[in-house]
Structures are given as C-alpha cells and as structure tokens.
Amino acid sequence: MLVVMKNDATEEQIKAISDVIRNMGYTPEPVPGVQRQAICVLGNKSRVDSSHIEVMDGVKEVIHVTKPFKLVSRESKEKSIITVGNNKFGSITLPVIAGPCAVEDRVKFLEIADAVKHEGATMLRGGAFKPRTSPYAFQGLGEEGLKILAEARGKTGLPVCTEVMDTDTLAMVSEYADVVQIGARNMHNFSLLRKVGRQKKPILLKRGLSATINELLMAAEYILSEGNWNVILCERGIRTFEEQTRNTLDLSAIPIIHELSHLPIIVDPSHACGRWDSVPPLARAAVATGADGLLIEVHMNPLEALSDGPQSLKPEKFSQLMKDIKNIAASIGRKI
C-alpha cells in the first residue's frame, strides 16, 4: 500500500501516518520524489484496511500496490533518474559505460580509458575482482586493479563502475568505485544485496543467468528496502537452449521493466552474445528499444585479453558504434 500525501503536508502529519502504520504491525518507508511525498507500507501479506488512514490530515490518496516488489514498482514512484557524475541514467541522455572486462595492467587500462573517452564513452568499466567459471582463470588484480581504476578516473574525468564479489570486499570496492556492480552470479546473493542497500553508492544490478524479470525486480527490492534507491538495472542476456551465442539477449525486458518499475535499465550486449561481431547490432537494437544506457566491452587487442576477449570491440569498432547509436537515439528523441 502507498500513502500519497498532499503537497502541503506537514512533518507532524507524516509522522502521525507513520506511527499509525507501525501500530498496525507494518513498516513505513518514505518514498523520495520531486512531485509528491509518499509513504510505502511494507510487511503486509494481504490487502491492508486503509479506511482510517484515508481520512487522516495531509493524506491525498491511498494506492493499493498490486506488485510483490512495492518500492521498485512504478505504482510507488513514477520515474527515477540516477546521477553519477555527469551521467543521468533514466533521462533523455544515454550514458555509455565502456572498457575491458578486467583491469589487466596499468598501462593497458589507461590506454583503453583514453581511447573510449575519445570516442564518447561517459563512464569506465573494468573488473578488479572477476568471477570465473574456472578456478585457474585470471581472477583480477584485486585492490591494485581498483587503484588503477581510480587513476584512470583522475586522468580522464570519467566515473568508474566495477564489480563487487562479496560482503568482505564491499567496503574496499566502494572506496574506489563510483558505481558498484552486482554481477549476474550474485543477483541472488541476498546478504550482499542487503549490505549494498545500506550505503548510498549507486548500484548496477545485473539480471541473473536464468532469472525472470520479476526475480530481477525482487532483487532490486532487497536493495531499496534497506534505504538505497540509487539502483540501475542491467539486462545482460539469459541462458537458453541456444548454442550459437553465449546467452540470449532479452530486449523485451526493456519495455516491460519500464512499465513495471521506475528504475532505469541499461543493456550489456557484450555478455549477452559473447562474440564481438554481434555486439554492434544488439547495441543498436537496445537503444531503439528504449534502453537507458549501454555497457560495452572494449580492448586494444582482444586476442591478448585475459578475460572475455572474443566479445570485446576494438576502439575503431567502438567508434563506429558510437556514431550509429547517436543517430538511432536522435530518431527516438534521445541523445548520447
């Protein structure tokens, strides 16, 4: 249930509503918004009798939220714009996050960072901690990788996005990162979701390998329920029976999530297909479908990459992609 307050509602009236909700055995959660002040009722398993709340001073209306994801639902908030530096996820401008899968080497990463900035990228990506299927594969540089990311941010002026693997390293990653990424394998790591929800650092939440849209939104609900509303969703493909691609990119998730939730959603076509030649057409399609941004892997020499080289674009291919998506974005009233 969502209690929408009048524009001139006082703090005393809002507190009175919250006290009533607590006395009913539920939890009141303030919903931030420019147009309205609202209170979301959490903890109920069935419809709440709102008759006495509706007549209280300062109340404009009571909306019974029908979705299990209450805070994430568009019924609780019309639209969220997540600001990271000069990037505004959910606005008419589409941020492009680019860089290698992993931070492999200081000189190489700084070279890639300069190249993607030159071509129009607005944020940097790169993993300092890497979840790999094989325990013998390159696992990342750890804190040294985070320091390289911070140095690249200082040189380029671009914010950085990097993945956190567990609760033990969250404080370290948050110290260096502008956006903390929850990878597909961790979408159901509920203790990690709760912990990132207790900080204000923006979170990039990737869809799980076989997760439904509802499950992705419920994972986001964990984060918002702890107080962090700065969440950016990411469609990165789901595992299907198809063997020609690494995953199957679910572009239908974009308009559906826009209908269901106020959170912005970006697309990672690199992990979706696993092959560089499919990245540009999928990225173009994502922009046309209404994605709020892109996450693209770029490497100076993909053949030498220690992680996910086959799906990485060379800078010249990334340059052409940026030109293509600018035209597509303009045709639907948006811009890069």
Image: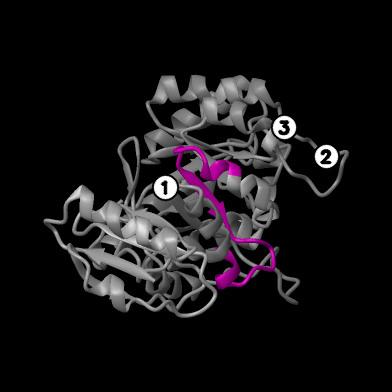
Q: Is residue 212 magenta?
A: yes
Residue 109, located in which quarter of the rendered image?
top right
- Label of residue 140 in the image: 3
Image coords of residue 96 (percent x, y): 41, 47
The quarter in which the N terminus is drawn is: bottom left
Q: Is residue 37 magenta?
A: no
Secondary structure at numbered mark 2: loop
- Label of residue 230 in the image: 1
Q: How many marks?
A: 3
Magenta residues span: 195-216
Against 273, residue 172 (above or below) is: above
Please tell me which residue lies in front, 24 or 139.
24
* Mark 3 residue type: Gly
Against 323, residue 142 (above or below) is: above
The mark that comes first in sequence, 1 or 2, is 2
* Mark 1 residue type: Asn
- Spatial separation of the CA atoms under disc 1 and disc 2: 32 Å
Please tell me which residue lies in front, 305 or 153.
153
**In this image, 290 relative to 270: left or right?**
left
Answer whether residue 325 is visible to the viewer in this image.
Answer: no
Image coords of residue 308 (percent x, y): 69, 46
- Tell which tag, 1 or 3, sits nearer the viewer: 1
- Label of residue 137 in the image: 2
The mark that comes first in sequence, 1 or 3, is 3
Contact (Cβ within 8 Å) of mark 1 with mark 2: no
Please tell me which residue lies in front, 282 or 179.
179
